[in-house]
Image (spheres, rainbow, N blue to C red):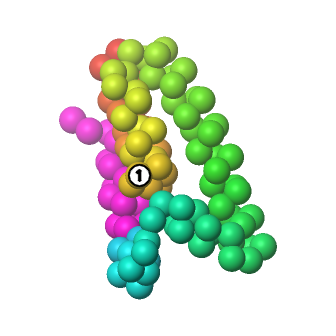
Amino acid sequence: MASSKQIFYAVMAIVGLCATWYFNLQAMELDPNFSFASFIRDNYVNPSSASIANDIAVILVVFFFWSFHEARRLGIKHWWIYVPLSIGVALAFAYPLFLLMRERALANQS
């Protein structure tokens, strides 16, 4: 049976996916030349957005470092999948998904 933490992380992964891709799809529709490079460039249109972009970039690097070691410690397989999910889908999706898998691994150890 799923714990309340697992349910929370699953819901937040779905929210993270929907909340980011709602705007990603709008950006793709508005820009016929949309690319990953243009997406990154658009994050630096003013100091406020650049601050948030840099904030997220640091969190992303820390997440990769921590999740790699945590996955090894807990025996979570296919850790590498969270890298393309974070970059290609959304960190707001991949991070709670990893936390969900971490909670499942912890529950299986008990």
Residue at 34%, 25% (x, y): give it. Answer: 78
Name the spot of residue 43 as percent of width and height, x first: 62, 69
Near-viewer residue (38 or 18): 38
Near-viewer residue (12 or 65): 65
- Whether residue 11 is in magenta: the answer is yes
Q: In the image as oriented, which residue stretches furthest toward the bottom? A: 30
Which residue position is annotated with label 1? 88
Asked if residue 8 shows in the view, the reply is no
Q: Quadrant of the C terminus?
A: top left
Name the spot of residue 18 as percent of width and height, x first: 35, 67
Residue at 68%, 70% (x, y): give it. Answer: 44
Residue 71 as seen in the image, left or right of residue 110 = right
Which residues are the magenta region?
A: 1-22
Q: Quadrant of the N terminus?
A: top left
Name the spot of residue 97 as percent of width and height, x first: 38, 43
In the rendered structure, which amino acid carries the disc numbered 1?
A: Gly
Asked if residue 40 shows in the view, the reply is yes
- 43 to 73, vertically: above or below: below
Q: Main secondary structure of the magenta part?
A: helix
Q: In the image as oriented, which residue stretches furthest toward the left? A: 1
Near-viewer residue (26 or 104): 26
Q: In the image as oriented, which residue stretches furthest toward the right? A: 47
Residue 97 as seen in the image, left or right of residue 54 = left
Residue at 41%, 38% (x, y): give it. Answer: 82
- 96 to 106, vertically: above or below: below
- Whether residue 50 is in magenta: the answer is no
Q: Quadrant of residue 74?
A: top left
